Amino acid sequence: MATPKKKPDADDKIMQLLDTVQKQKEAIAQAERPSYRTNMTFSFVDGDLSKAVNLRTVLDVGQLIKIASYVRYSAAAYEEAARAILGADEKPPAFLWCNYTATDWTHDIKLRVGQLRLKIQRDKLADFESRLDKILTPERRRELELLAIERELVGGTPP
């Protein structure tokens, strides 16, 4: 005869939610190491870095979108002008802005926007974790601390 399953209590649910938070935090940590194609220094005047913007420091998504639209529009206008001047048969030199292609700029700006979104998500997860920790019972908190100590002493995870 099978033993009846124990109904999960609130602490079990909290532990499941804390595990979910931890997994999402690990996913964020992995995504925070982007591989940029440009030097992340953008200027609206090609080649003039005296008024350059370091995209790593830009926190405004709107500004990043404006930069991306400027480069993409410039690339499209360049291609159109090249067809008008050179004709459809001749391939123009590649479009570069501050020594990088429009595709490279778009790629890096997408990564930067993703980083900004990750910061928001990371803050939200920290809030969830804090709220869940507050409602965890003292007995379960003691149990978790005991497991943490055991892991540290053994140097791995307990069986």
Image: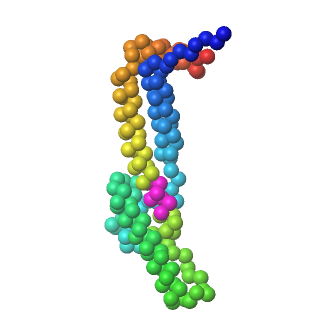
Q: Is residue 120 left or right of residue 5?
A: left
Residue at figure coordinates x 54%, y 18% from the top left: 151
Residue 48 appears in the picture as rendered: no
Q: Position of residue 19 (x, y in %)?
A: 49, 29
129 magenta-colored: no
Using the image, determine if residue 18 lies above or below residue 63. above
Q: Left of 94 or right of it: where is 142?
A: left
Identify the residue shown where x is 36% and y is 34%. Answer: 127
Name which residue lies at 51% across and 84% down: 82
Residue 103, given in percent of the width and then of the height, sits at 52, 66
Which residue ends up furthest to the front in the rendered image?
1
Q: Nearer the viewer, residue 13 or 139?
A: 13
In the rendered view, would you say 51 is above or below 114? below
Indicate whether 93 appears above or below 67.
below
Quadrant where the image shows the N terminus: top right
Query: Percent position (x, y) of residue 55?
Result: 40, 58
Q: Magenta span covers which residues?
A: 106-112
